Every structure is written in structure tokens, then in C-alpha cells.
Image (tube, rainbow, N blue to C red):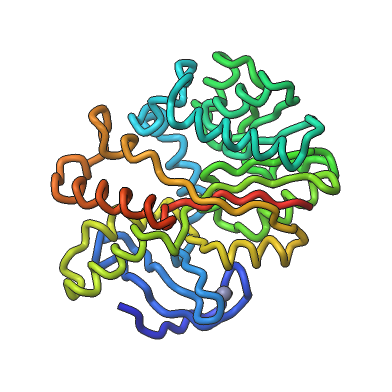
Amino acid sequence: MTSKLKIDNYRCIICDGNRFKEFFNLEKISKKPYRVIKCSNCNMISIYPIPSKNFIQRHYNNPLYPKSAYFRNMTINFKGSPEAKLFLKGLNLIEKFYPNKGKILDVGCSSGVFLNMAKDRGWETLGIDVSKDFVNYAKKNFKLDVRYGFLKDFSFKENSFDVVTLWDLIEHTREPKELLKEVCRILKPEGIVLILTPDQNSLIKKTTNLSYKLSFGRWKTPVNVVYDIHHLCYFSKKNLTMLLNKIGFKTVYVGKEETILDRIVGEESDHWIKKKKFVVFALRLIFFIAKLTGKQNKLLILSRK
Ligand SMILES: [Zn+2]
């Protein structure tokens, strides 16, 4: 599965290393012109080449994107949903480490459910997103201050936010290190960043990699599902906390969460994988074992500036 790869003028997004191994060639797997590469120094996994900003903007502004059944709980009827429970947990953690409620910025806020919950608890809120439809939804339905654009576009004043949240966001960014540096700049001293992102050391990632290897590259479906090209970088606890540390953060909480599986394979899902009954069975089994063994597929990290 892994072979040495020489890429000119390309540096690891975390450690600046320039030696990589090819993890997967997506050209062979899903006919997409990308590779999944692994840094030989820090084990960071990323998509190469990094898709253009235009490609990313087009994806999130496809009219079908916010309408996907994947987001069906991210509406004004969010109460009682698994998403709302996760956001509540996040808010409780934030308030544990930052008891004086102040100004919170949610980067990639989608429809505004999290910000609405934060506002109800007394936080001053601001959201940004690169999906125009989501921005309009949050404004219209939750009456939130939500703006369209990438974080860099806004040039917020330094030391201006108490908390910045990145729910399922960092893996979608082209320059995660630059993003975290900007978050650090705009956070007040002692401010908190919350990050939720897939964990490269999860059971689902390990079994996907292994199934591909053991089938000599014939079983492509799991790789196709798990290595989505809209996820541009794949962190582990080790290299994400290392990156945060390098930028000037001190990690105060690391926990495990999991993808809400019903969003993908539940009754109302419109995901193509739902029709592959064996894959759905295997996914549910792996998620069950992952929960028992603490190898769930997402990392929830809070770090202090
Ligand atoms: Zn590296």
C-alpha cells in the first residue's frame, strides 16, 4: 500500500518535512486525480494535490449540499437530536474551562444550530461559513449574526474572541496550520479553541486500511467512503496536539466522539453507501466495537491560548 514518493516543492502541512509515502492512489480507487499521502516524519496524512479554493467553494455552494439528508437535524427542529447533544457537551466543556461567558466565533457554522444554543446560554455569537445557503438559513431562522467567507477574509482584530469553535472544519481546510495560527491571533489570552475532527487512529480507519491491504487493493468501497476528498487532512491526537503546541496552544481536554452513523446509513439517509447492506452491517459493528474500546472515529480537543 505504501511506496516512497518524491514530490517537488511540497512540504508537510505540519512539520515541513519533504519525504512522503503514497498511502492510497485515489486514481485507482475512485478515478479521482488525487493521492492520499503520509509524511514520513510526523505521519500526517493529507490529500495531494490540495484542491483549489475554487473547487472547495463550488462544492459547498452546490444547491444540493445543504439539502442533503446528512444535515436533516441541522434545522430549527434540532432539539433532542444527537447533534444537539454533542453541541451541549461542547458548551459544557467550554464553560468548564472558560467560565466567564464572552464572545464566541463558530468557523464553519453551517445552519447555526450550535451558535443558537450558545446564544441561549448567554454567549455573544458570530458565525462564518462558505455556504451561502447555510448563512442565509442561520440569519433567517435563528436571527444570528452569520457572515459568508473564509476566516482569512475577515481580518478580525487580534485578541477579540473568548472562544473559537471548529466543528468538523479543520479537515476541510487547505491550510490547517495557517487557520490555527489565525485562530490563535484573534483569540484573547487564555481563550479556548474547540476542535472536532476525524481521528486517523480510529478503528474504522485501521480496518479500512487493513481491508484494502489484505484484499490486494480489490476491496475499494471502504477507502472510497472513509477517504473523502473533501477531507484534505487527517489528524491523529499526537500530531494535532503537536501542531497546536507549536502554534502556542496548551491542550486542556482530549476526548473521543463518533460520527452520527444514522446521518449516513440511517433510514432517511440519501448516501449511496446505504444500499450496500454488508458495508452498513460492517460499519455498525466497527462503530460498536470502537465505542467499547475507546477507538471512536473523532477527536474532540479543547486548547487554551
Ligand atoms: Zn510531517
Q: Is residue 296 left or right of residue 255?
A: left
Residue shown at 42%/80% (left/top)? Answer: 21
Q: Which of 279 and 154 is in front in this view?
A: 279
Residue shown at 31%/60% (left/top)? Answer: 32
Residue shown at 49%/16% (left/top)? Answer: 76
Q: In this view, does 285 lie to the left or right of 236?
A: left
Q: In this view, does 211 lie to the left or right of 132?
A: left
Q: Nearer the viewer, residue 164 or 262?
A: 262
Q: Position of residue 296 (x, y in %)?
A: 42, 53
Q: Quadrant of residue 22?
A: bottom left
Q: In the rendered view of the protein, which quadrant contains the N terminus?
A: bottom left
Q: Where is residue 227 in the image (x, y as percent from the top left)?
A: 36, 58
| Vertical order, 57 against 211 (above or below) | above
Q: Nearer the viewer, residue 11 or 45?
A: 45
Ligand 1 located in image quadrant: bottom right
Residue shown at 42%/82% (left/top)? Answer: 5
Q: In this view, does 246 lie to the left or right of 239?
A: right
Q: Where is residue 56 in the image (x, y as percent from the top left)?
A: 48, 47
